Image (spheres, helix red, strand yellow):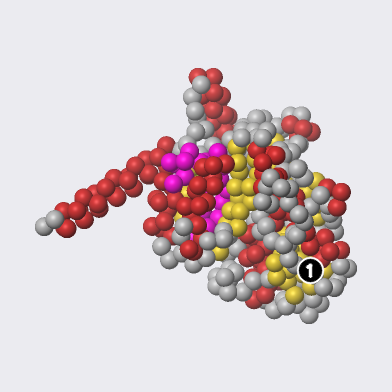
């Protein structure tokens, strides 16, 4: 089989430069919060020094969400006004290292994040295997419009690299669920279940593309020769492929207050347990083991009485704050304080420089 991996050449409507712009315009007309999932594997020797600068840019634009910075790159999801999201991405890409950063944009009626955070990590997606570098070795990217052709091939082994609770609410037809609770378990799954001599063609996918990009790098290093992964992940596939042609079943778990999105990239039917953070159905919410903000049928038995009491108090404080009209889920005060410290340090440095130049 020969894959035709190239950009979609379908003509765009006259008033838009691309079909993506038309889609974003239609979505934005009814939903005023833009949500951007972004990542890039790139060597960042100064990632610690980048943190306050990135945080300041987010706070100044009233953008919420979380970004992770590590030596190996950047990863995260942020949300805010579309113009502010675009301005931030433009600022980020003014650094050549972030030029062409991979991001997916969707829209929502309400702010899906509570706070603004920039975190320093050892890895932007934690596999726990040293020396795996997607900048050096990586599998073959497959565009969303070419994905169906690849996974219909009977010689292709299709693997969902996401965690078990994500797979359970939606996945591609005939995809294998590795039954992992964390991405750290994926290397062991490969060692125990896959063989380079037997599994000649492997295709992988994840939510936005980052996990399977690192997974494909690991598999190439492990001796697998023909390794493919879905460029832009499930979110790009749902944005690109019509429902009449889809091979996706169910909903896609996302790491924000929407919990999951359907094929139209709109909030789906799932809620979330605020104790274990797993998606829950209406049936789960009807259970006696479901206590809002405290537990769900999945985690009820694993929680101690002390934990349940602590979660109950947390939920009580949240509800009291709502009644008082307080912004208990607003921009993180610790982030604002960190921004202020950074600005003070920058001003002191500026004054020292001026003093040195005028001596």
Q: Nearer the viewer, residue 199 or 42?
A: 42
Q: Would you identify the image quadrant in which residue 205 lies?
A: bottom right
| Tag 1 secondary structure | loop
Report whether 328 appears left or right of 241: left
Q: Residue at x 69, y 45 (%)?
A: 15
Report whether 291 appears left or right of 44: right
Q: Position of residue 171 (x, y in %)?
A: 78, 52
Q: Position of residue 106 (x, y in %)?
A: 65, 44
Q: Residue at x 82, y 66 (%)?
A: 150
Q: Nearer the viewer, residue 89 or 265?
A: 89
Residue count near mark 1 (Cα–Cα under 10 Å), binned few <14, some 14–19, many ≥20: few
Q: Is residue 186 above or below residue 110?
A: below
Q: Residue at x 77, y 56 (%)?
A: 10
Q: Which residues are magenta?
A: 57-81
The answer to whether residue 272 is visible is no
Q: Is residue 63 magenta?
A: yes
Q: Position of residue 282 (x, y in %)?
A: 77, 32
The answer to whether residue 243 is visible is yes
Q: Nearer the viewer, residue 270 or 89?
A: 89
Q: Position of residue 38 (x, y in %)?
A: 58, 53
Kindly report the secondary structure that dominates the magenta region of the rendered protein: strand
**Residue designated by label 1:** 4
Outermost residue toward the top in this view? 324
Q: Residue at x 78, y 80 (%)?
A: 197
Q: Is residue 105 magenta?
A: no
- Quarter of the picture containing the C terminus is bottom left
């Amino acid at each position: 089989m020969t894959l035709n991996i190239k950009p979609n050449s379908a003509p765009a409507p006259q008033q838009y430069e691309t079909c993506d712009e038309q889609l974003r315009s239609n979505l934005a007309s009814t939903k005023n919060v833009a949500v951007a999932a972004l990542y890039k594997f790139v060597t960042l020797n100064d990632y610690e020094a980048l943190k306050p600068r990135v945080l300041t840019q987010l706070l100044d634009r009233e953008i919420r969400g979380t970004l992770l910075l590590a030596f190996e790159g950047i990863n995260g999801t942020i949300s805010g006004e579309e113009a502010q999201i675009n301005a931030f991405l433009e600022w980020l890409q003014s650094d050549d290292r972030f030029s062409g950063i991979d991001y997916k944009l969707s829209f929502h009626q309400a702010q899906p994040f509570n706070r603004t955070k920039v975190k320093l990590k050892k890895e932007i997606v934690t596999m726990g295997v040293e020396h795996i570098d997607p900048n050096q070795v990586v599998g073959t990217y497959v565009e969303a419009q070419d994905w169906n052709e690849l996974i219909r091939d009977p010689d292709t082994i299709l693997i969902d690299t996401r965690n078990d609770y994500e797979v359970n609410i939606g996945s591609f037809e005939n995809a294998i669920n590795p039954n992992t609770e964390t991405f750290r378990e994926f290397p062991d799954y490969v060692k125990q279940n896959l063989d380079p001599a037997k599994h000649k063609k492997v295709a992988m996918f994840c939510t936005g593309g980052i996990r399977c990009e690192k997974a494909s790098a690991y598999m190439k290093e492990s001796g697998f020769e023909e390794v493919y992964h879905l460029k832009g992940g499930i979110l790009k596939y749902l944005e690109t492929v019509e429902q009449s042609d889809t091979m996706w079943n169910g909903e896609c778990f996302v790491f924000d207050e929407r919990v999951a999105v359907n094929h139209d990239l709109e909030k789906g039917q799932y809620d979330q347990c605020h104790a274990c953070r797993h998606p829950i159905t209406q049936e789960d919410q009807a259970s006696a083991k479901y206590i809002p903000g405290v537990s769900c049928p999945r985690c009820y038995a694993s929680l101690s009485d002390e934990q349940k009491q602590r979660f109950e108090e947390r939920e009580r404080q949240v509800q009291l704050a709502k009644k008082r009209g307080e912004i208990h889920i607003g921009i993180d005060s610790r982030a604002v304080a960190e921004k202020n410290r950074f600005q003070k340090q920058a001003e002191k440095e500026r004054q020292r420089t001026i003093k040195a130049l005028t001596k």
